């Protein structure tokens, strides 16, 4: 209790120091302003016959300009740092209050999810193998995203269309790399804003999601001559690959992701024991790489068949036999090949 009281007492000391420094800075600003105005007036008065006549005054003013530019740079850094800290304080308190409100709710069925700040503390205290924004954490976010995205979209298809339709992107298992890379990118770029206000999450999601969607569409068309979506008929689109409407959705997803979805995934990852965590990560990574390479080969061979290219190798004939057009159309029902 004494330690806590000492920490909280720091607020008083900080406030006293701040008020003192604030007064000194305001006095300094006033003195500098008056001094510089006086010197500039003198410069204007004395340099009528040429500035060389007031060389010392010119040098003094240039010195002051350098000093003020250095001060401006320092104050800009302080401005960003203090603004960030204040925003994080308010956000952490607001999220802790929201957590307490959910915890005390009479209507809750499950315990509310931990805040990002609580998760950070648990990861660091337990020295978890996937703590922070590291490779291990990002892989598990990617892996869960590959699987979770497929499940969610299949359920959405069932609700909106009344039937289950494949939304996978790989030939082995219910995985889709687009969702995985989307989850990975959102987590990687938004992680530093996890304890900041929602504006930063929206802006980050808007930008990151749009870039991911554009690149996925571009490389799919370049590598396989196929597309899985086209926004050409939607206003404010860019080459039919992205559009303003879905970019806004990406921004909303950025908020939901880093404030709601990512914390739940982080809690799941925390439950993976340290003893097996790294080994299991590497094993699943190898599987996903092999699955991706095999899927790429199968889709490439499918595109060759569509273009009338006959099988020339044993591997091609094996693919044709194992993954004929009928089976591929069931696995990838939304994939369309672009005419040359």
Image: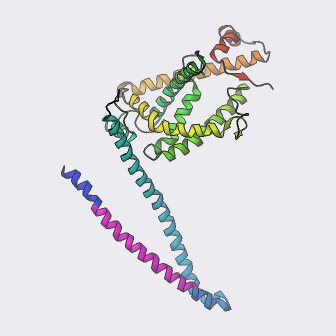
Q: Which residue is situated farthest in the left direction here?
A: 2
- When asked about the image quadrant of residue 51, the answer is bottom right
- When asked about the image quadrant of residue 333, the answer is top right
Q: Is residue 323 above or below residue 277?
A: above
Tell me where residue 102 appears, x and y as whole percent: 35, 35
Q: Is residue 27 above or below residue 187?
A: below
Q: Nearer the viewer, residue 250 or 171?
A: 250
Q: Is residue 258 above or below residue 303?
A: below
Kindly identify the residue that appears in the image at 55 percent across and 45 percent down.
203
Kindly identify the residue that appears in the image at 70 percent across and 20 percent down.
300
Kindly identify the residue that appears in the image at 40 percent across and 39 percent down.
116
Q: Which residues are magenta?
A: 12-40
Q: Is residue 324 visible?
A: no
Tell me where residue 38 appears, x and y as whole percent: 53, 86
Tell me where residue 150 appears, x and y as whole percent: 55, 22
Kindly identify the residue that appears in the image at 56 percent across and 31 percent down.
181
Q: Is residue 151 above or below residue 323?
A: below
Magenta span contains residue 21? yes
Q: Is residue 267 visible?
A: yes
Magenta span contains residue 166? no
Tell me where residue 151 appears, x and y as whole percent: 52, 21
Main secondary structure along the magenta-highlighted residues:
helix
Colouring scheme, one of rainbow, by chain, secondary structure, one colour: rainbow
**Total numbered labels:** 0
Q: Is residue 136 left or right of residue 234?
A: left
The quarter of the rendered structure image containing the C terminus is top right
- When asked about the image quadrant of residue 49, the answer is bottom right
Q: Which residue is situated farthest in the top direction here?
A: 321
């Amino acid at each position: 209790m004494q330690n806590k009281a000492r920490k909280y007492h720091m607020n008083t000391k900080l406030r006293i120091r701040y008020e003192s420094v604030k007064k000194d800075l305001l006095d300094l600003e006033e003195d500098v302003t008056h001094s510089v105005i006086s010197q500039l007036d003198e410069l204007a008065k004395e340099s009528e016959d040429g500035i060389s006549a007031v060389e010392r005054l010119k040098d003094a003013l240039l010195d002051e300009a350098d000093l003020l530019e250095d001060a401006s740079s320092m104050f800009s850094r302080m401005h960003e740092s203090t603004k960030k800290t204040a925003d994080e304080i308010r956000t952490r308190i607001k999220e802790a209050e929201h957590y307490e409100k959910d915890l005390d709710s009479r209507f809750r069925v499950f315990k509310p999810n931990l805040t990002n700040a609580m998760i950070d503390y648990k990861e660091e205290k337990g020295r978890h193998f996937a703590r922070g924004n590291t490779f291990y954490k990002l892989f598990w976010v990617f892996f869960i995203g590959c699987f979770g995205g497929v499940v969610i979209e299949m359920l959405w298809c069932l609700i909106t269309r009344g039937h289950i339709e494949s939304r996978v992107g790989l030939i082995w298992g219910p995985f889709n790399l687009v969702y995985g890379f989307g989850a990975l990118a959102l987590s990687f770029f938004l992680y530093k804003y996890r304890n900041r206000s929602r504006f930063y999450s929206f802006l980050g999601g808007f930008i990151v999601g749009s870039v991911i969607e554009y690149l996925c569409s571009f490389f799919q068309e370049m590598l396989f001559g196929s597309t899985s979506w086209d926004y050409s008929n939607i206003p404010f689109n860019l080459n039919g690959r992205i559009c303003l409407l879905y970019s806004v959705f990406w921004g909303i997803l950025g908020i939901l992701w880093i404030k709601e979805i990512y914390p739940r995934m982080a809690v799941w990852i925390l439950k993976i024991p340290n003893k097996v965590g790294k080994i299991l990560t590497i094993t699943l990574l190898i599987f996903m790489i092999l699955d991706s390479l095999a899927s790429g080969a199968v889709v490439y061979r499918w595109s060759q068949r569509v273009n009338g290219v006959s099988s020339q190798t044993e591997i091609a004939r094996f693919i044709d036999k194992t993954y004929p057009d009928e089976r591929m159309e069931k696995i990838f029902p939304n994939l369309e090949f672009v005419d040359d």
